[in-house]
């Protein structure tokens, strides 16, 4: 295991600065997470955002919920902040004269949806309305990120990971999120008010596990941003996966390591 990543040391050593909190659409302090595994709620289907579906909390990490749509498979889990406007208590859809929909990829015949809905809600533990947050934090008025600023960002290809990142470019209301120590394979553009980007220090407040930069054999010994002086590990095999098969899907390009610490012998 790598050591604990220290932003303090990393910022000093890279000479970079953290994007100020006012750049982000996040609360001044991370929202309290009172959800529990097994609770059900209403969520927008991420693959079909006009549908409101029933979702079950299958995991919790910091201020985020790992959600699975009832009637879907276990390959399409998604993560939401507890203060997201895309999650609501059960009953909200009906209250607004909406209809709960089967998820995209509903396992059963569409005609069995009404009965499925009845059964999935019968005896279910519904997340109580009081643990939802009244409002999503407001979006900042404008994109005030600057190229080079550091932040914490969800790896959208591996959304359970939050990783150290740098603003690589700006494009109107969009920000290019680049992941430190990886050569572009995970980078993405998002709106400046995306809920997937966080100020430096966010994970240490929520208890989320911030991944160290991708750095196998590339951190110079002098770059001691891992507090135990270890070089860290570039790959983060999923627990239980044998080494050598680290969850890379066939056909997907191997991520290359990069960064100022990325030059061999640097
Ligand atoms: N084992 C995967 C995970 C890569 C994660 C990269 N993130 C943290 C930027 C792979 O190597 O593809």
Image (cartoon, grey):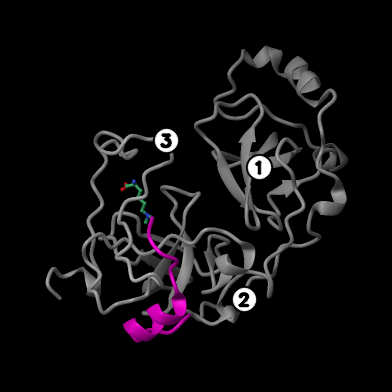
The residue at 82%/37% (across/down) is 126
Question: Marks 1/2: CA distance?
Answer: 24 Å
Locate the N terminus and report the quarter of the image it occupies. bottom left
Question: Which dot, 1 or 3, sits closer to the camera?
Answer: 3
Write down the residue under mark 1: 44
Percent x, y of residue 30: 67, 67
Can residue 155 be spotted in the picture?
A: yes
Residue 167's quadrant in the figure?
bottom left
Label 2: few (<14), some or many (≥20) within 10 Å?
some
Question: Does the numbered disc 1 mark a residue whose Cβ is under 8 Å from ligand 1?
Answer: no
Question: What residue is shown at x 37% (from left), y 49% (from top)?
Answer: 236
Q: Position of residue 206 (x, y in %)?
A: 63, 63
Which residue matches tag 3? 240
Magenta segment range? Answer: 1-18
Numbered circle sitting on residue 140: 2
Tell me where residue 198 sits by quadrant: bottom right
Which residue of the protein is positioned furthest toward the front in this rendering? 228
Q: Where is residue 141 shown, x and y percent of the image? A: 61, 78
In which quarter of the view is residue 63 placed?
Answer: bottom right
Query: Which of the two labelled residues, at mark 1 and mark 2, occupies the earlier sequence position?
Result: 1
Gap in Å between the C-alphas at discs 1 and 3?
A: 31 Å
Residues under labels 2 and 3: Cα distance?
41 Å
Q: Nearer the viewer, residue 101 or 148?
A: 148
Mark 3: which secondary structure? loop
Q: Secondary structure at mark 2?
A: loop
Specify whether 142 is left or right of 123.
left
SS class, disc 1:
strand
């Amino acid at each position: 295991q790598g050591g604990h990543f220290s932003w303090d040391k990393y910022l000093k050593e890279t000479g970079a600065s953290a994007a100020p909190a006012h750049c982000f659409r996040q609360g001044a302090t991370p929202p309290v997470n009172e959800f529990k595994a097994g609770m059900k709620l209403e969520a927008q289907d991420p693959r079909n955002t006009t549908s409101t579906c029933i979702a079950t909390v299958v995991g919790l990490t910091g201020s985020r919920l790992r959600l699975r749509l009832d009637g879907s498979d276990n390959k399409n889990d998604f993560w939401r902040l507890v203060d997201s406007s895309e999650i609501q208590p059960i009953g909200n859809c009906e209250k607004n004269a909406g209809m709960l929909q089967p998820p995209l990829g509903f396992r059963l015949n569409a005609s069995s949806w009404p009965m499925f809905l009845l059964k999935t809600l019968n005896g279910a533990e519904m997340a109580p309305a009081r643990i939802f947050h009244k409002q999503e934090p407001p979006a900042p008025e404008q994109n005030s990120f600057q190229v080079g600023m550091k932040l914490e960002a969800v790896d959208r290809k591996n959304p359970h990971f939050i990783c150290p990142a740098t603003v690589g470019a700006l494009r109107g209301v969009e920000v290019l999120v680049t992941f430190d120590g990886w050569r572009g394979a995970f980078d993405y553009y998002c709106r400046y008010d995306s809920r997937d980007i966080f100020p430096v220090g966010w994970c240490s407040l929520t208890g989320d596990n911030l991944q160290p930069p991708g750095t196998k054999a590339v951190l110079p010994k002098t770059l001691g941003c891992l507090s135990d002086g270890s070089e860290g590990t570039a790959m983060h095999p999923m627990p239980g996966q044998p080494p050598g098969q680290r969850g890379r899907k066939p056909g997907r390009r191997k991520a290359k390591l990069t960064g100022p610490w990325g030059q061999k012998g640097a």
